[in-house]
Image (spheres, grey):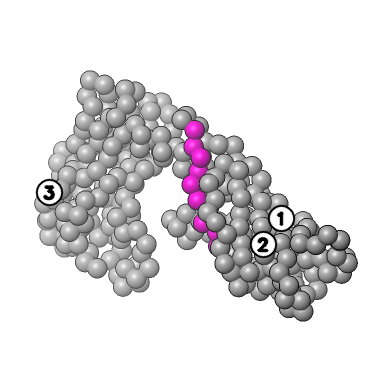
């Protein structure tokens, strides 16, 4: 889509229009950092330099404009990072995400005068709606169930390293039943049901108004304890626990991790 440029009372010559198009994408590394990429394509003949970027996304509380100094060369796509902000979740559902509006302050190499450029970005993969759906589903689960680990862990050294035996605590906050169906580790640390504590039930626990709390035996261990992983890891303690209403699709959420648990985990992989 071609850009509309503001700032003047009379239209600029067609030759000076900034012919830009925008699209929303999300790379794998963006997911844990709560951001997307704004892909810009310049179909004009002259390099455009983006001085600032703002994206207004209906259904999100977008942050303020970000300063940039990003050249967009003709016919060479450029991705600009954008933290999408908070999703405005309803009490029971995600918002219906509207078309994102990208506002740029930009200039060309031959003309340093700043211009305001507004574009309606495409989102062909439905990235923003998926983010909203996922965020609001997690928010509802966290409203229904509290998850954390008990502070006491028992280390056991074996041929593959240290395995930590502990317990995941689940507490029902609401009145509707919920099931704990699965646990899984982060990149650095693995997490699984602790088979040494006895047969593993399915689901792992059922919370009801009559049985509001559960203590689930789990085992933690070093999954990828190497220098590259340690240097690149952003959220080493982001374990996943799947929670579901009976008969519905489970949603993965992250339990709280206390300092005693972090200290214990370093027995398996220190960093």
- Earlier sequence position, callout 3 versus callout 1: 1
- Near mark 1 (Cα within 10 A), the count class, few <14, some 14-19 or many ≥20, is many
Does 185 sit above or below residue 140? below
- Which of the two discs, 2 and 1, sits closer to the camera? 2
Q: Residue at x 41, y 26 (%)?
A: 247
The answer to whether one can see residue 28 in this image is no
Badges 2 and 3: C-beta atoms under 8 Å apart?
Answer: no
In this rendered view, identify the residue nearer to me: 189 or 9.
9
Q: Residue at x 47, y 54 (%)?
A: 34
- Left or right relative to 137: residue 225: left
Q: Which residue is mark 3?
A: 152
- Left or right relative to 249: residue 171: left
Mark number, residue 139:
none
- Earlier sequence position, callout 2 versus callout 3: 2
Asked which secondary structure carries label 2, the reply is strand
Q: Residue at x 22, y 24 (%)?
A: 211
Residue 163 in percent (x, y) is at 17, 55
| Rendering quarter of residue 60 | top right
- Left or right relative to 154: residue 1: right
- Left or right relative to 75: residue 226: left
Residue 191 in percent (x, y) is at 27, 50
| Rendering quarter of residue 197 | top left
Task: Give the quarter of the figure containing the C terminus.
Answer: bottom left
Task: Give the quarter of the figure containing the N terminus.
Answer: bottom right
Q: Residue at x 46, y 30 (%)?
A: 91
Badges 2 and 1: C-beta atoms under 8 Å apart?
Answer: yes
- Near mark 2 (Cα within 10 A), the count class, few <14, some 14-19 or many ≥20, is many
On whether residue 3 falls in the magenta region, the answer is no
Disc 3 to disc 1, C-alpha distance: 54 Å
Q: Which residue is mark 2?
A: 104
| Rendering quarter of residue 186 | bottom left
Magenta part of the chain: 81-90
């Amino acid at each position: 889509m071609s850009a509309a440029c503001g700032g003047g009372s009379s239209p600029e010559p067609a030759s000076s229009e900034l012919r830009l198009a925008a699209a929303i994408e999300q790379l794998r590394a963006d997911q844990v950092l709560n951001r997307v990429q704004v892909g810009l394509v310049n179909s004009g003949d002259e390099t455009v330099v983006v001085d600032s970027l703002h994206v207004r996304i209906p259904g999100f509380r977008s942050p303020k404009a970000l300063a940039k100094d990003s050249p967009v060369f003709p016919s060479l796509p450029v991705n600009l990072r954008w933290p999408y902000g908070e999703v405005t979740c309803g009490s029971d559902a995600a918002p219906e995400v509207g078309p994102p509006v990208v506002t740029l302050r930009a200039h060309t190499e031959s003309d340093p005068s700043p211009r305001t450029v507004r574009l309606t970005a495409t989102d062909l993969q439905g990235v923003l709606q998926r983010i909203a759906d996922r965020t609001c589903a997690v928010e509802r689960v966290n409203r229904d169930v509290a998850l954390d680990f008990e502070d006491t862990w028992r280390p056991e050294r074996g041929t593959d390293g240290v395995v930590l035996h502990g317990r995941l605590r689940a507490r029902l906050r609401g009145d509707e039943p919920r099931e704990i169906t699965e646990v899984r580790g982060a990149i650095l640390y693995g997490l699984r049901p602790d088979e040494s504590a006895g047969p593993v039930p399915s689901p792992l626990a059922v919370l009801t108004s009559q049985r509001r709390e559960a203590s689930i035996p789990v085992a933690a261990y070093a999954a990828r304890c190497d220098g590259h992983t340690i240097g690149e890891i952003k959220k080493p303690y982001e374990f996943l626990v799947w929670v579901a209403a009976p008969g519905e699709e489970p949603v993965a959420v992250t339990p709280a991790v206390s300092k005693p648990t972090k200290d214990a985990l370093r027995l398996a992989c220190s960093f």
